[in-house]
Image (cartoon, rainbow, N blue to C red):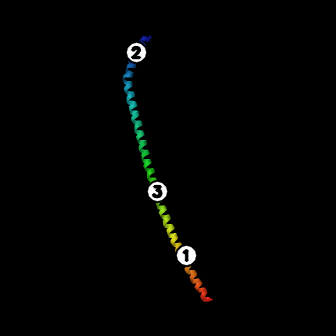
Amino acid sequence: MNVYALLGLMIPLVAVLLLFGIPIIAIWTDHRRKVLDMKLRSRQQADQALLQRIDEVQRQLIELRETATQYDVSFDTSLQRIEARLNGIERRVEVVEQSGQRTTH
């Protein structure tokens, strides 16, 4: 076969490949772009859900801190009341002891 005959066969083959190849490549690249776009959107939705969950956990942590602070203040107040009562009882015991010592002398 000579070179010109080979070129004569290749020209229609290349034409057919270009005629069908370019649209097939365009369809494939468009499909690939859509798939990547769907993956990106899915990842963004997952990221958004994660951010919402983090915000919720932060809010719960703030509430927990506030509750702990309220209980701490309440505990301190109760402790101060108990100390004041104990001081009052100790003073009364001292008065009773002193009056008991006076009567025995």
Q: Nearer the viewer, residue 19 or 55?
A: 55
Q: Residue at x 56, y 79 (%)?
A: 91
Mark 3 to mark 2 CA distance (whole Å): 78 Å
* First-in-chain label (3 vs 2): 2
| Image position of 60 with respect to 7: above or below | below
Name the residue beneath numbered marker 2: 9
Query: Helix, strand, or loop for circle 3?
Result: helix
Three-letter code for the amino acid on which mark 3 is drawn:
Ile
Three-letter code for the amino acid on which mark 1 is drawn:
Asn
In the visual, does 84 lie left or right of 2? right
In the visual, does 34 lie left or right of 75? left
* First-in-chain label (1 vs 2): 2
| Image position of 29 with respect to 85: above or below | above
Quarter of the figure with residue 38? top left
Whether label 3 touches label 1, CB < 8 Å: no
| Image position of 13 with respect to 70: above or below | above
Identify the image quadrant of the N terminus.
Answer: top left
Q: Within 10 Å of the Cα at label 1, are there few (<14), some (14-19), or many (20+) other Cα atoms? A: few
Residue 62: mark: 3
Identify the image quadrant of the C terminus.
Answer: bottom right
Name the residue beneath numbered marker 1: 87
Mark 1 to mark 2 CA distance (whole Å): 114 Å
Q: Residue at x 54, y 78 (%)?
A: 89
Q: Position of residue 18 (x, y in %)?
A: 38, 22
Give the mark toward the camera: 3 or 1.
Answer: 1
Query: Helix, strand, or loop for circle 2?
Result: helix
Q: Nearer the viewer, residue 26 or 2?
A: 26
Query: Helix, strand, or loop for circle 1?
Result: helix
